Amino acid sequence: MPAGLLGIEELDRAEIEAILARAKDFQPMQSQSLKKLDALRGKMIVNLFYEASTRTRTSFEIAAKRLGADAVSITASGSSVTKGESLVDTLNTLGAMRPDAIVMRHSASGAPHFLARYLPTPIINAGDGTHEHPTQALLDARTILDRCGHLEGLKVAIIGDIAHSRVARSNVHLLSKFGAEIVLCGPASLLPVELAQLAPGVRLTTDIRDALKDADVIMMLRVQLERQHEASFPASEYFRFYGLQLEHMDLAKPEAIVMHPGPINRGRELSSEVADFQRSVILNQVENGIAVRMAVLEKVIG
Amino acid sequence: MPIVIRNGRVIDPSSNTDRVADVLIVDGRVAGVAPNLSSPKAEVFDATGMIVAPGFIDMHVHLREPGFEHAETIESGSRAAAAGGFTSICCMPNTKPVNDSAMVTSYIVERARSKALVNVFPIGAITKGSAGEELAAIGAMKAAGAVAISDDGLPVMNARVMRRAMEFARSYDLPIIQHCEDLNLSAGGDMHEGVPSVRWGLRGIPAASEDVMVARDLVLAQLTGARYHVAHISTRNAVAMVDYARQHGLPATCETTPHHFALTDAQMPPYDSNYKMKPPLRSGGHRDAIVDGLAAGTISAIATDHAPHPGSEKMQEFERCPFGIIGLETAIALALEELVAAGKITRIFSMIRGNINKAL
């Protein structure tokens, strides 16, 4: 199997540390007037997105270009998927054009893992169904490190639709490898009890106040209505019991930061005041996304 | 030419035989079982160190003909059966068209007569098109050769329809075989709901979706007096409930499959669709209960649920792949390896022959 990046679960701590350290090297570049290196000049990256995405796709595209690589982006609606071609056939076709890596997002959990068994081209997972979103967890870790300096011993509350969240799964794997205390919180119908066995250091609660108590980091998740196949909870009262509001911040540590993978829904999973709160690092996450994805691209095809 | 099978360990529970002997076959029939049989003109097969047994019966296979001949035919399925030691197989009705009429039943019987290497016994549908609404022509199918009824692949969700079907099955003295799955609880599921499904972000099929259907059906079996059989049983509670029903005198039986006694969801490689079937591979606790149920006799039959699909259909995203695994060629080896050699069960032949003969 070619060395791509399929998930955080398979990485060890040293590999993650190397990516995060390299991302730190790339951070200053983001504010320079000349933002381009030639480390990956002559390399070709295909962004293949079978699901709508603005920030992740753009972020990968910019990361590739800042390293001097060429990037082509394909969205599912404009490609042969609509003509009934199988996923393997589509990927083999793209593979025959000899890209150096394929960045892929797909609505089916495990789609990149399945393809990696048949394809010689390295695959970078940009989100697979409700499974993993490895670069999101890496950029989240980079953002926490920038603020807190370390991950070990931090209490991280992840709140929302955990069942359908690939962001939560990747973050759980990453934070657990670094010895953080992880509290997953949401209504019971979105919080399967098996999550407690996902990795060491994970605890579940259905009480948002319990989750927030003395938290260092608060990660809010989007309510993913498009992934829910049934009414798992009454949408009308979600915000009242699981939405993050300004007064909640008193329960957390005084320096606690608020994160969100985006896109945010003001008034659904967090109040507008919290989104614009001074300790909200949502835009820092977006900015770090580019540095982290540069580090990942360099590692995979450099 | 006569054939003599020399020096094998001949096992036949129905005649209480278990000894080293020769078996003489003349015109395709067993003509004698004794030590040192002499038959000068016979072709000799040396079976020293092997077990010689009457052909096995698989009461649950999918032959895909008519309608899905690109996946399997009556001929190819029967070859797989013969290769696996099965001389009789019962084929489920989820073909295209569904075997819900005497015409389709007769077609299968006819095709089997001309093409099959083994005996093929059709199982008729419970409802028209296996749609779960209107009863199929059960009596006519029996007259054409059906040995049981089932909508396998799908459950009969409507309790009132199931009740009537059980009453008809009793009138015609046919066993009624249920695929136990509450479709509301299992909706969208791709594998057993447990730690691996949550880890891999795959939607789960909870054990409860099997349990609630078995519970409902056992109540209906008590109400109607039907001979009720649970197909491919896979959960701890379902085995316990069948056991309870049997203790209380209900004519309830169940079968399990080689994959359910041999494998668990935790042993499955991530997103490998060869491991995708219904019911799904369950967790270790359920698997242990299945083995215990076999050992205790609550589960009286091993059936393969042989369900072939073309390779291209299995080579897709996990959630798009069809459910089903083949089993005819590997079932006996798995039973001997996982059950007998592992010391769980000493005798399996009744589960692949004797009990099924009695049930059908």
Image (spheres, rainbow, N blue to C red):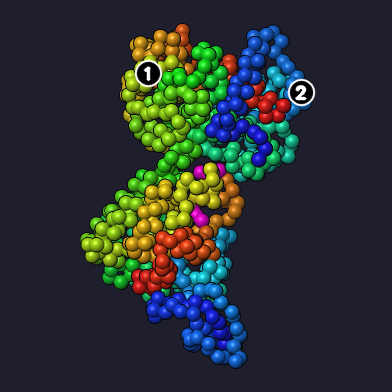
Give the quadrant of residue A20. top right
Residues B178 and A40: in front is: A40
- Which residue is the extreme one toward the right? A42
Question: Looking at the rendered structure, which numbered label has been put on residue A41?
Answer: 2
Q: Nearer the viewer, mark 1 or mark 2?
A: 1
Q: CA distance from mark 1 to mark 2?
A: 46 Å
Helix, strand or loop: magenta stretch: loop
Residue A116 is situated, as x and y percent measured from the top left of the image, at: 63, 40
Front residue (pair B337, B355): B337
Picture quadrant of residue A293: top right
Assign a secondary structure to mark 2. loop
| Disc on the earlier residue, 1 or 2 | 2
Q: At 36% across and 57% down in the image, what residue appears?
A: B292
Q: Within 10 angstroms of label 2, few (less than 14), some, or many (20 or more) residues?
A: some
Q: Position of residue B14 (x, y in %)?
A: 39, 78
Q: Is residue A104 left or right of residue A213?
A: right
> Where is residue A6 drawn, in percent x and y?
59, 34
Label 1 environment density (alpha carbons within 10 Å; few <14, some 14–19, many ≥20): many
Mark 1 residue type: Leu
Q: Which residues, given as a range, are shown in magenta?
A: B317-325
Magenta span contains residue A10:
no
- Circle 2: residue type: Arg
Residue A212: which disc? 1
